[in-house]
Amino acid sequence: MDWDKILSEIGIVTVISGLIVWLIKQLGQMFIDRNISIYKQELQNKSDLYKAELNQVFEKYKSDIAFHSQKAFKLHDRRLEKIDELYSLLSDFYNDMFTLTTWKIVTGMTKEEINKQSYDNTMKAGESGNKFLSYYDKNKLYFNSETCTLIDEIIQLLKESHSDFSFKYIFGNISPQMEMESIKKATEKIRRKVPEVKVKLEKNFREIIGVEN
């Protein structure tokens, strides 16, 4: 038996087998690397797509925020204008009503002059009251329920007081006792009750416009 030849052949086979094993490993590694590369690319593509979608959503969100913020600012500015005008009209109405309870008879005035002055004051308060009520009715939606409740309470008090003064001009002369009673009730509302509610309304307005107390 030629051992040298056998050993030589075994060595060749061993080398070939080693080469085959190495080749298989290399091919396997290449396959694995290729799959990993493909997988990485897929992840990158998905990541890029997700970023693009996220950016799109974020940009829309910023746009929506900007739109609503601008809308809120415009509404707030609009409300400030309404509050300013409404409070001015309310002050005119209240001051005219207050005049009805405080104006003094000047010495030497005749009865006709006194009646005319009283009538003119009553009519003036009625005109300023109508302006206030008309403006409030047209712009009521700008005010929340709490504000409207306070305004409605003031309106009720002022209207009742004005009715107490204007009753005789609408339905004719009334007895002096009844007239004095009406004036007394109206004076109580104008001098005490209205200011109490007016203070609450002013506080409410300050909170809306952001003025510190």
Image: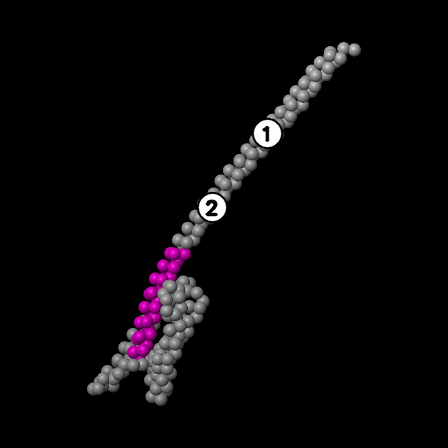
| Pointer 2 residue | 58
| Pointer 1 residue | 33
- Residue found 55% across the figure and 33% down from its top: 41
Most prominent secondary structure in the magenta stretch? helix
Split into 4 quadrants, where in the image is the N terminus?
top right
Name which of mark 1 and mark 2 comes first in the sequence: 1
Q: Amino acid at mark 1?
A: Asp
Q: Residues within 10 Å of mark 2 (few under 14, many from 20)?
A: few
Q: Report helix, strand or loop for mark 2.
A: helix
Q: Amino acid at mark 2?
A: Phe
Q: Give the Cα separation between the discs numbered 1 and 2.
A: 36 Å
The question of residue 103 being in magenta is answered with no
Q: Residues within 10 Å of mark 1 (few under 14, many from 20)?
A: few
Magenta part of the protein: which range? 72-100
- Residue found 72% across the figure and 16% down from its top: 10
The answer to whether residue 175 of the structure is visible from this angle is no
